[in-house]
Amino acid sequence: MKIRRDFVFLVLFAVAMCAAWGDSLAARIKLEELSTIGGPETDALFLWTAISVDPEDNVFFSDALDCSIKKFGPDGVLLKKAGRKGQGPGEFEKPAGVAVIGDQVYAWDLFGRALQVFDRNLVYRETLLMPGTVDGLAGFPGGRVAACIRPSYTQAKVVVFSPDGTPVREFALSDPKDPTLFGTVSFAVDPSGESYFGYLFRDLVEKRSAAGERIWARTAIGAGPSAVNDVQGFKVPSETCILSLARDGQGRVFILGGTKAVHQGRDVFVFRPDGSVLASLVLPEPSHTLYFDHRDRLYVSADGGVTMKKYRVTFE
């Protein structure tokens, strides 16, 4: 009997030590608020959908309700607004994204199959037609641009093109046998050209090579399959998994959980470049976006998209 009691004690002790060891490996994250732009009492931002920051710390937004893209200085003062409602050059129906890549500012509409190109003073230059709806944009090594494109509701691919819009290569993300890819795709690119992807209706984070080959795949939230609704013959998941994905300058990947997370729009899961779990945190309030600038400062939305908050992120 004593031997059995000793054995049980040793097992419980080992479990406790493993738990403590696991806690010691989990990094703790501290957020320090640095600044804000917009707010419920101002009309600076009506509903910003995406953000990008240039090397001079100017902040660019796509504003869906204002049908425009906006440039703010490092001090948060509005410097320029471009666009109005319409379908002509420099006009938007519902701008969904903006990205500063090199000397150009790219912007695109929700469900739009084109990129509008501006200079960094928001002077319109040209429109580049795309082979599908644009979900996101990122700079690739060598001055090339990578666009995540959805040719249809259940398909997604990455198209890499030169700054003048000439396609260089592409690779598919979608699996014809997997309808859960329905919805937008978030992605980020590292300096080597490897990419990270997160899916709105699927609890899946992937790392792929520059050629599109899968390096690893992980779940982020750990939730089960979503319930689905039948919408005009399409099986549409009713709960969201990954709202946004961003990479910091240290190669860490941050994933923002959707309705399937415990804290909707607030739970952030952090992975190392090799796919191992590093940490998690809960944002002070719900956001729809995560974004890191060149100084590794984190930008999120607040107040339903009328406010931008910038944080310093510290790992302890």
Image (tube, rainbow, N blue to C red):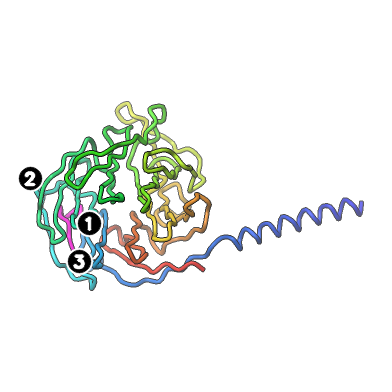
Q: Residues within 10 Å of mark 1 (few under 14, many from 20)?
A: some
Q: Is residue 101 left or right of residue 124?
A: right
The answer to whether residue 53 is above or below residue 213 is: below
Q: Secondary structure at mark 2?
A: loop
Relative to 182, 12 lies left or right = right
Q: Position of residue 293 (x, y in %)?
A: 32, 62
Residue at 19%, 47% (x, y): give it: 163
Residue 19, located in which quarter of the rendered image? bottom right
Residue 106 position within the rendered picture, expressed as x and y whole percent measured from the top left: 19, 51
Q: Element type at marker 3?
A: strand
- Label 3: how many residues lie within 10 Å, few (<14), some (14-19) or many (20+)? some
- Which residue is the site of mark 3? 72
What is the magenta range? 63-71
Q: Which residue is mark 2?
A: 88
Q: Which residue is mark 1?
A: 102
On the picture, is 79 further left or further right than 295? left
Question: Three-letter amino acid code at disc 2?
Answer: Gly
Q: Is residue 287 above or below residue 108?
A: below
How far apart are the alpha carbons under marks 2 and 1? 25 Å
